[in-house]
Image (cartoon, rainbow, N blue to C red):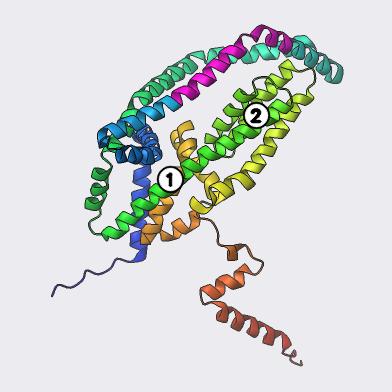
Amino acid sequence: MQENPTKRPYSVELAASLISLALIIALMYVLQSVLLPLMFSILIAMSLYPVAIALERLRLGKAFSALLAVILAIAVLSGLVWFIVHQVIVIGRDGTDIQHKFLTIFDTIQRWLQERFGIEPTEVVERLRGQANQILSNAASYITAAFGSIGNVLAGVILVPLFSFFLLYYRVFFREFFFRAFKSVPQEIVHNTLNKIYHVVQSYLLGLVTVMGIVAVLNTVGLWIMGIQYAWFFGTLASLLMLLPYIGIAIGSILPAIFALATKDSAWYAVGVIAWFQVVQFLEGNLITPNIVGGKVSINPLMSIISILLGGMLFGLAGLILALPLTATVKVIFDAVPSMNAFGFLIGEPEKYHLKRYSTKILLKRWKLRDLLETRDKKKGEAKKEPPEDD
């Protein structure tokens, strides 16, 4: 009878897992030009999977169903882009009036600076001119970066639909790859982990789209009540910026506030726009998202912020968008790997008992350490009761 191999110590397994994770992150950074379109394609394919399944039930064929689902997604995204571009063109027709209003505001600010701080208008102009010269001196690097970004966007426009189609069409083929790659792991665990990743990411994506729709309506209603022109455009644009978690709505409030400052007679309209968007952000973070997404994507806020910062460092703007679904995927994988289970726990939401008043005692009881604590407290109490020795 063959003997079972000796189990490796936990410290060795943990070190191996951490080293592997570091190497994977380094490889992702090097290959990001290919991986970024692929990761966005995976998210889109997960979103389109129910659509493809519904089309397959109509006996349209697997390939045609996948192709039709991708075409439908392209049509929706193209319509959204057309709406934004069209509104920008319409707003641009009033550019002369807005420019005149901004010049009036600038003159008012100059007079206020002169009366309050004694700064002459020429000083303000010189400082602005200095900033402009500095920007122009770096124009070459800005233009190079812009062309590089345009190239990446064009590559994404071609690659993302192509990748999404093949991910939908070959989905069973890819699932068998994971079964073959992890033969040493029980196949049921591999199957359940893949299903859990799919459900977690899809719940996040569908929840995000639903929340964005609700926020767009709330933004638009607030702007419409204040009489801000193009309320639908500004409200929708701000909701789309929710792809940048925690900061999207705040950034989205700047543009309508500036527009209100340029088109309204009072600066209080701009203050009202910013205030309303902050109210919407509060409602989104504390009421809308928790009730729609709930515990389906269990990442605690601290780890969410850290993952967003790390995603931005790793992939830039795309990393900010991908941070939360990637973190949710990593958590599912960590939960399935014994050596990384503690890190999966760290990423997740705290249990109710962690936030109670006597949470420390509950924790010690769960880990069978309460008796040790009581014995220690008892010894401390007896030591205090003993009378001092006479000299």
- What element does badge 2 sit on? helix
Residue 69, by quadrant, is top left
- Is the residue 79 above or below the residue 25 in the image? above
Q: Is residue 239 left or right of residue 80?
A: right
Front-lying residue, 303 or 237: 237
User: Which range of residues does the magenta coloring cover?
Assistant: 77-103
Q: CA distance from mark 1 to mark 2?
A: 28 Å
Residue at the limit of the structure toward the bottom, as seen here: 390
Q: Residues within 10 Å of mark 2 (few under 14, many from 20)?
A: many
Which part of the image, by quadrant, shows the C terminus? bottom right
Residue 351 point in image, percent of width and height: 55, 62
Q: Residues within 10 Å of mark 1 (few under 14, many from 20)?
A: many
Front-lying residue, 176 or 382: 176
Does residue 313 appear in the picture of this structure?
A: no
The residue at 47%/59% (across/down) is 345
Name which residue type carries label 2: Thr
Q: Read off the residue under disc 2.
A: 220
Number of the label disc, if any, that sits on residue 296 = none
- What element does badge 1 sit on? helix
Magenta-highlighted stretch: main secondary structure? helix
The residue at 70%/38% (across/down) is 279
Name which residue type carries label 1: Val
Does residue 10 appear in the picture of this structure?
A: yes
Number of the label disc, if any, that sits on residue 201 = 1
Residues at marks 1 and 2 touching, judged by CB atoms closer than 8 Å: no
The residue at 26%/49% (across/down) is 178
